[in-house]
Amino acid sequence: MFTLPLLAVTLFLQVKFSLQPGLKYALYGALILSALHAIFAPLKGVGDFATYTNAFLSVSFIIRAVELLILHDLDALEHLEKISHVSSSILYSWEPIPKTLGYRRFLRVCNLIANPRAIGWNYGSTKYLPPLRPVEGEAGGDHCAPEHENMVLVADGDRRTFLRSRVWTILLAYAAIDTYQAAFARNYPKICDSVDRFLNGVVGWDIAPATSEMVVRRYLLSPGCWIAAYAFVDGIHSAVGVFSVGILRGFSPKYAGEPWMYPPVFGSVRHLLAFSLRDIWGKMWHDLCRNPLLTLSRAAIPMNIPVGLQRFLIICLTFFVSGIVHVAGTYAVSKDLVAVGMMMSFFCILPLCIAAQHLISDRFLPMILPQNEISRSVIWLVNLAFVTGWGHITSPWFLDHSKLPEAIGSVPLPFSLWKLAANI
């Protein structure tokens, strides 16, 4: 709980590091100690969700600190700053982080921390930027201030459509998390008993209750947990977008966000239906932490090696660091080293599975099969079998040991739709 404010203070005071090197090392040390405290000595009595999230985010903020303070030159970073409206467009200017300690620098620091995808920053991916039209100082007429340079125009976004879609996403996310908690947090024994009665009484199998519980965990809890995790991330992102673009505009239009600042965090579900691990994790799953993890991995892998090997090592290191982030939350809740080992096994084997599937489906099978519809169907079936096998074997390593199901089950909701409707 202390790592976030410490990171904000460190970035805010970064301009003083050259004059006071002792301050830099003191803040760096405090950041590390804060993250270690969140993992090994978390606060008691705050619940699994708070404990898991605190440790998870604390390690994530350490990675952000490395990215912003070591791998990037903070003084060279520039951000699109809103200047004024010009007709149906908004005038922005590329502005560096103010070096004067004050309110504007604090706002930029907060944006950096809360914006791991670097949307609107010159070091982020261009895919997160809207179409920019460069303008000269006189092009905007009276709206342009002569003290601003590198000005660009951005078409005004459709806020009404954006807010409608994000509110709908929040409602669906709330319903998904509430359903997960009703089924698996509050009524897990009843779910297991119902499945046991169904398998023994209706299907006619003669299986023990422990086997029925395994079926529940493997085939009901597992997809339910992934759906709830998806809903939680998407719902939080949408809620922030609604506040910034909609609610904040009523109080402070200058600092309100625009729709282009909140692109979707998840890709299309069609990538999931392609049954390609590379597409599932690279295109469908959320990309909130992708930029910091890849920046760290690229900095650690030498550039003077073959490109294919370089990419493979970057992917392996990215998943390894991602595993450390998730393991932090796991250990903070469970204090179980076996769980840590199983979690790291999941994240270390995943890039190997991605590479193996790529070689089989994208390299080997297209070489030996003719180029026609039947061959594409065969490759799709091979991918389906591969992802099914991967999920059947390795998914329990994550779900049984990560403590993510317990964390999602303890997400504080103001009320339960299921309790109100059916007292479930």
Image: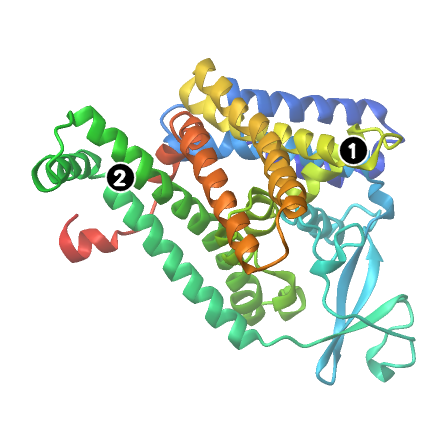
**CA distance for labels 1 and 2:** 42 Å
Asked if residue 41 can be seen in this view, the reply is no
In this figure, what is the number of numbered marks? 2
Extreme residue in the top direction? 337
Q: Which of 223 and 261 is in front in this view?
A: 223
Give the residue drawn at x 63%, y 75%. 157
Give the residue drawn at x 17%, y 48%. 424
Rendered image: mark on residue 134: none
Q: Name the residue under label 1.
A: 310
Q: Nearer the viewer, residue 206 or 343?
A: 206
Compared to residue 276, the image places residue 153 above or below, namely: below
Secondary structure at badge 1 equals helix
Q: Where is residue 60 in the image (x, y as percent from the top left)?
A: 61, 34
Give the residue drawn at x 63%, y 53%. 370
Compared to residue 81, the image places residue 2 above or below, namely: above
Q: Name the residue under label 2.
A: 184
Q: Position of residue 239 (x, y in %)?
A: 48, 58
Indicate how the structure is coloured in the image.
rainbow
Secondary structure at badge 2 equals helix
Q: Nearer the viewer, residue 55 or 293?
A: 293
Q: Which amino acid does label 1 sit on?
A: Gln
Query: Position of 92 compared to 208: left or right?
Result: right
Query: Position of 187 compared to 56: left or right?
Result: left
Compared to residue 43, the image places residue 77 above or below, namely: below
